[in-house]
Amino acid sequence: MSAVRHFLDIDDFDTVTLKGIIAHAHEMKAERKSDLAPLLPGAVLAMIFEKPSTRTRVSFEVAIHELGGKAVVLNPNEMQLGRGETIADTAKVLSRYVDAIMLRTGPHETLLELAENADVPVINGLTGRTHPCQIMADIMTYEEQKGSIEGATIAWVGDANNVAASWIHAAARFGFTLKIAAPKEYPPADEFVAFAKSENADVIVTEDPEEAAKDADCIVTDVWVSMGDADADQRKKLLRPYQVNAALMEKAKSDAIFMHCLPAHRDDEVTAEVIDGPRSVVWDEAENRLHAQKAILAWCLESKSKQLGD
């Protein structure tokens, strides 16, 4: 039996594999309206949501549908998991029913325990630590707009959260410069800074948003207050200087683009002028969650696809 192919974090993979997944995403996007036979007919994806979702929920469900399969949507309140059944037992049971599991949760340890005990691929749909599927879609979007991301300069402005953490992983694997501007209260976690150093990744951390934005090819941000944050007023006060507005975009290259994983709060982390303006690619970015995740599912279930093709 071949090893199970999980998709947990970008740093788990080599550059060739990651580029191959994104290349496949581009191909499937181009072929979306064609009459090609689906890659994964009959495949079943279990999707467990411990956190609310719009893009992750819809994009994964449509992805497995377009690949020829079906999704089973679960939340802990509807499962024995919400009544004390262990993650390990849940993983073992689901492995007998489905071909893959996508989990959107808070504790990263939940994801790791699920993957450790599952006999089918487990995909990280978001944890409090990282959000790799989002960054795969972001890189796909950058490539559509500006070509190869290798050698580019990406500026992250705001809380150095789980999305920023996956950008750090990506900087090491895809060979771009990442400049993170965050207040000292919300810096990247030490483990990600140490990872960047160990990989000789070009990751620069500053408290100055203008320094990060200077000559950037792309500026990225995220909400100031995430699900579960109890200190909303304090966060907004500290992050106000990190708003992405027209003045900050002017510090970047003249053809720089703007990204945001959404949902967005206009006139908090980004002004309406920027997110709804001509340099914004947030809607392409959101669409590409579908295509990137189709490619991730195809990679995770490649052995099943080959069996179906025999």
Image (cartoon, rainbow, N blue to C red):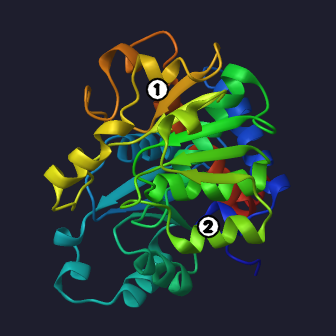
Left or right of residue 9: residue 184 = left
Secondary-structure class at tag 1: helix
- The picture places residue 2, in percent across and down from the top left corner, at 77, 77
Most distant residue in the right direction: 16
Q: Which is more toward the observer, 197 or 281? A: 197
Label count reads 2
Q: Residue at x 65, y 60 (%)?
A: 10
Q: What is the quadrant of the C terminus in the image?
A: bottom right
Above or below, 135 against 94 in this view is above
Secondary-structure class at tag 2: helix
- The picture places residue 237, in percent across and down from the top left corner, at 22, 46
Q: Amino acid at mark 2?
A: Val
Residue tagged 1 = 282
- The picture places residue 21, in percent across and down from the top left corner, at 73, 47
- The picture places residue 122, in percent across and down from the top left corner, at 54, 69
Count neighbours of disc 1 (C-alpha within 10 A) and say few if under 14, some if 14 to 19, many if 20 or more: many
Q: Residue at x 60, y 64 (%)?
A: 9
- Of the image marks 1 and 2, the number of the one nearer the N terminus: 2
Question: For residue 5, which quarter of the picture?
Answer: bottom right
Q: Amino acid at mark 1?
A: Val
* Numbered badge on residue 193: 2
Q: Residue at x 42, y 89 (%)?
A: 88
Q: Residue at x 69, y 24 (%)?
A: 144
Distance from disc 1 to disc 2, alpha carbons, whole Å, reads 27 Å
Above or below, 292 against 42 in this view is above
Q: What is the quadrant of the N terminus in the image?
A: bottom right
Tell me if I can see residue 67 in this picture. Answer: no
